[in-house]
């Protein structure tokens, strides 16, 4: 992987500024809360992404570098055992100090040092670490949208995050199908651009003839499942999923609310509002996606089927709904857009495991992906909170099957 040094400083400045822009509509109080373990306080994201550059780039590669604060390594290390001790994840909401202004000062301090470093003649290995740091920050930009939506969506006032409006709804017709021919297909990243280590291990898979729907499952279609008693019928649910439904009394996707005899949902760009029937259903767990597919008499695609379909039919265009669109919510299908990129991350039927020949990198960077390859499912395609330059067909996102605070949705498949 070779990174053009001439562009790296501008890219660094742009990505770092975008993170602060995401947080700019928040109050100081919004920055601090941690309602559940999966949600990190926004100010923790601001600190952690800065700590990444300080720890992995400035300390080892900037001569005479002085830490901004010796305590920040303990506060903002996420899961890197190699680097040292850290605050446990459940206690991030206890960090009333340092304050938001102090963390923003930390960002400025590190950014100044990084920009000085990037003006020099750097080895490719350092530029690779810078790009990894920027890709890491873009991941946290998406997590910020999940967490902000959870924080504001659980506020009794359901405050809007943004005044931006989503495209007007339109009637969605019956889905068509994207056919995949039987045969051997190559899976994994091939090229010279950036990629995460979990995309490596290029290998061949045999895929039987099958077809994937040409759009995402809509709110209206998912509502049929709810109205038909899908959440009350054990036949559609895996055993662990059925226990999850009963234990947590799950009745609808997350952020849906039964208000005055109809379903409403919380949106970042509009607060509490009525469900848009044509928009893709989102905030569903793998458990729900799998149950819905069985109720329809269909199934979820494997990650390999999805990747092959995306390579054949996927297209990133001006109609693709990414973070850059500023809608902050999935939008109805537009003619010619198969929604393989953007809108919602699509659950697949594949467990998150290493590809053949996978080798985790040495050192702390090797902890980035490999140690999480258990008890999680793969999602593909990006979402309305994903930066458009951060996604590709080989990108492997992964979450535990019960989680649904992220922008996650459903595409159905069938055998032929």
Image: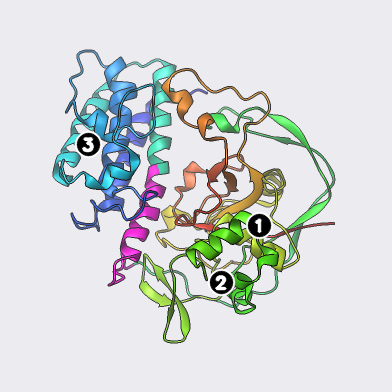
Q: Mark 3 sits on what residue?
A: 107
Q: In this view, does 365 lie above or below 75?
A: above
Q: Is residue 294 left or right of residue 220?
A: right
Residue 270 appears in the picture as rendered: yes
Q: Is residue 280 above or below residue 196?
A: below
In this view, the residue in front, 365 or 372, is: 372
Q: Mark 2 sits on what residue?
A: 219
Tell whether label 1 touches label 3 (CB within 8 Å): no
Per the image, label 2 sits on a secondary structure element best described as: helix
Q: Position of residue 157 (x, y in %)?
A: 27, 72
> Mark number for residue 238?
1
Residue 194 appears in the picture as rendered: no
Tell whether label 2 touches label 1 (CB within 8 Å): no
> Mark number for residue 208?
none
Q: Earlier in the sequence, mark 1 or mark 2?
A: 2
Q: Position of residue 366 (x, y in %)?
A: 48, 24
Q: Which of marks 2 and 3 is nearer the N terminus?
A: 3
Q: Is residue 257 above or below residue 193?
A: below
Quote the CA–CA distance across marks 3 and 1: 45 Å
Per the image, label 3 sits on a secondary structure element best described as: helix
Tell whether label 3 touches label 2 (CB within 8 Å): no
- On the image, which quarter does residue 238 sit in? bottom right
- Highlighted range, magenta: 140-163
Residue, x 39% and y 35% (percent of image)? 134
């Amino acid at each position: 992987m070779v990174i053009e040094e001439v562009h790296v400083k501008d890219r660094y400045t742009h990505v770092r500024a975008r993170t602060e822009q995401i947080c700019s509509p928040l109050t100081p109080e919004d920055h601090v809360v941690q309602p559940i373990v999966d949600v990190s306080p926004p100010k923790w994201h601001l600190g952690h992404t800065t700590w990444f550059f300080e720890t992995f780039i400035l300390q080892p590669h900037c001569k005479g570098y002085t830490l901004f604060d010796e305590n920040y390594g303990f506060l903002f290390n996420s899961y890197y055992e190699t680097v040292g001790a850290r605050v446990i994840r459940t206690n991030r909401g206890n960090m009333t100090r340092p304050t938001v202004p102090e963390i923003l000062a930390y960002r400025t301090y590190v950014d100044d040092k990084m920009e000085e470093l990037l003006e020099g003649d750097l080895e490719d290995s350092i530029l690779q670490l810078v790009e990894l740091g920027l890709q890491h920050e873009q991941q946290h930009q998406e997590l910020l949208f999940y967490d902000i939506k959870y924080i504001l969506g659980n506020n009794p006032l359901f405050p809007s995050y943004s005044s931006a409006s989503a495209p007007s709804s339109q009637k969605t017709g019956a889905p068509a199908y994207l056919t995949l021919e039987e045969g051997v297909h190559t899976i994994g990243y091939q090229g010279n651009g950036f990629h995460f280590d979990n995309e490596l291990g290029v290998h061949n898979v045999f895929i039987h003839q099958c077809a994937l729907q040409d759009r995402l499952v809509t709110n209206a279609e998912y509502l049929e499942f709810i109205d038909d008693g899908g959440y009350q019928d054990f036949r559609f649910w895996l055993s662990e999923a059925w226990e999850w439904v009963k234990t947590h009394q799950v009745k609808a996707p997350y952020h849906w609310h039964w208000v005055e005899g109809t379903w409403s949902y919380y949106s970042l760009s509009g607060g509490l509002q009525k469900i848009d029937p044509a928009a893709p259903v989102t905030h569903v767990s793998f458990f729900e996606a799998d149950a819905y597919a069985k109720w329809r008499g269909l199934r979820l695609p494997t990650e390999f089927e999805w990747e092959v379909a995306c390579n054949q039919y996927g297209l990133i265009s001006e109609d693709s709904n990414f973070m850059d669109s500023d809608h902050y919510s999935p939008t109805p299908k537009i003619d010619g857009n198969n929604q393989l990129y953007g809108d919602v991350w699509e659950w697949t039927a594949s467990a998150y495991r290493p590809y053949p020949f996978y080798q985790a990198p040495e050192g702390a960077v090797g902890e980035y992906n490999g140690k999480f390859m258990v008890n999680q499912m793969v999602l593909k395609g990006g979402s309305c909170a994903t930066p458009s330059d951060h996604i590709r067909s080989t990108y492997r996102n992964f979450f535990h099957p019960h989680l649904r605070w992220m922008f996650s949705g459903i595409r159905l498949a069938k055998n032929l």
